[in-house]
Amino acid sequence: MSRFRNRLTLTYVLMVGLSVLVAGIYMAYFFKESHIKQLEQTMVQEIKMLDTTLDWRSFDTAEERSEYYTSWAKALQQATETRVTFVLADGTVIGDSNYDVNSMDNHLQREEIQQAANGYFGSIIRFSNTLNENMLYVTGPIQHPGKFEGYVRLAKGLAEVEAGVRQFLEYVVIGLAVLFLAAAIVSYRIAQKLTRPMENMTRVALRIAKRDYSARVEATGKDELGQLGSAINAMADSLEEQVNEIRENESRLRSVLDHMMNGIVMVDANGRVGLMNGQAEQLFGLSCKECLGKNYTDIRIPSELQVIISEVMMYRNYVQHETTVYYPEERLLDIHAVPVYYTDEEWAGLLLMMQDLSELRRLERMRSEFVANVSHELKTPIAAVKGFAETLLNGAIQDAETAHSFVQIIHDESERLNRLIGDLLELSKIQSRQVPMQYSPVHLPSLLEQTVHILKKNAERKEIEITLEVTDDLFIEADEDRLRQIVLNLLSNAINYTPEEGKVKLCARPILVDASIDSELDEQIEISITDTGIGIPKKDLPRIFERFYRVDKARSRGSGGTGLGLSIVKHLVESHQGTLKVESEVGIGSTFTIVLPIIQDAPVDFE
């Protein structure tokens, strides 16, 4: 059956059926409520009668009182077919027609008792798990000072009432089914001939609305419906051609916008944002949905941009400006604001093109600083070599002791220059990944013991105690030479910057990525190097991994450092997909902590 015929048939059927159903439900509800109300009134009258006719007595013992009221409860149940319960004011049950009062809990918190405690009759319907049916509980307050002060509760099952309601609803359902069938037959006969061609055209129109432009209406004759079908077919042909062209152009435009490195924002003549690409979203920290259709003054963009847009909107001239914005993060933007026209005279709005120059400026600054640092670091040993060599040539070579001293200095400075050039080449190779990482299983305890042995003599000269704590049979997948270089650099720094008779501690232990996960496999390894050295000021901690950065330049040169060791360590740790952090306090010492994965994943790119 067609959709329109279904609607027509269902409308008639629902009108008849809902009328009968609503009337039947209302009558069933009214029948049930009135019957329950009548039962409730009857039970209230029974409680009132019981209050005036029952011989209320006082007793010496609780057993006598329970026996007396229980016998009365059972007698009243036989007469009224109602469960009877006597409850004292404190909630204690002293008589019940169905249960032993000694096994019953306190009834003070029962809802019907709480209602009766306020001075009027309380009633509630509650499901009884014992009898497996709904029960009507009615409670009335009884006040006979010195004899009985509490409540009388009557309970009666509602199974008979609910059975009557169900039977009534069955009759309603049967009548409703008959009416549904009759209405469906009549509606179908009336609508069949009228709706068939219309339903055909409706299906085609819906397919076109769902972008199925290949749908066509079957020939229906030369009458009005036939002409309508021909018009729909012509419209579908035109739409298909236009939509294909629009999709192609839109795909090209979207592809260009999404792959542009510059942020693009289109603002129409009324100041509303009409277009924004992904790069602009990143620059503003906003989503396209938040901005489209809103005025540029109502969205959270930097005030510098709002000023530029306002200027172009007012004077309609091209503006190019380089400015710094601070939200969502500090960026240097090169902004081009171009006025846009539909025709030579029809103003369309403006186009904002934004290029983020922050990274470019940062790289330029880093390159300048690097060149300056390298020049300075190379100049110092070269100047020393040149100066002492000239001194020797000018006659100092005749003095054997002085000549030997100067030659030793020249040798030391050349060694320092060699180390500096070697570290520069090493750092360059690591950053450019010219030397691939050779991962293999490494027995960590053996590697750490060998590293400590290499530096043991240096530590003994300063009477520094080195402690090694490592878990036995601990393996890690890593480049063994690079891992040894990491530990060697950090351990050497710890010895160099720790005063005599100090302590250096090297620890390695397995850790879990998430302690809440019960796993038998340790997923990471933590290597920490702790010393009792001079420490690092807090202001210098963020920069100690920069190339050539030194906290104490005089001490670093005196210890033979090039200023590149920690930078090399940082890049090697990142090459192992690990993390490196430092904690330090001046005068107390420092702790460098490395966290590495036990198993290496696919290699990642680093700056």
Image (spheres, grey):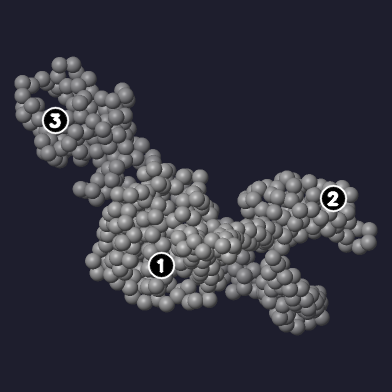
Q: Which circle marks residue 523 in the picture?
A: none
Label 2 element class: helix
Q: Which circle marks residue 94 in the picture?
A: 3
Q: Mark 2 points at which residue?
A: 313
Residue at 39 percent across and 55 percent down: it is: 496
Q: Nearer the viewer, residue 167 or 280?
A: 280
Residue at 41 percent across and 47 percent down: it is: 535
Q: Which of 86 and 606 is in front in this view?
A: 606
Of the residues shown, which amino acid type is indicated by label 2?
Answer: Met
Q: Where is residue 368 in the image (x, y as percent from the top left)?
A: 65, 59
Work out whether mark 1 precedes mark 2 in sequence or the reverse, and give the earlier one: 2
Relative to 137, does residue 118 appear above or below in the rendering? above
Image quarter (top left, top right, bottom left or bottom right) of the C terminus: bottom right
Q: Is residue 607 visible?
A: yes
- Which callout, 3 or 2, points to the residue nearer the camera? 2
Q: Name the residue under label 1.
A: 485
Of the residues shown, which amino acid type is indicated by label 1?
Answer: Gln
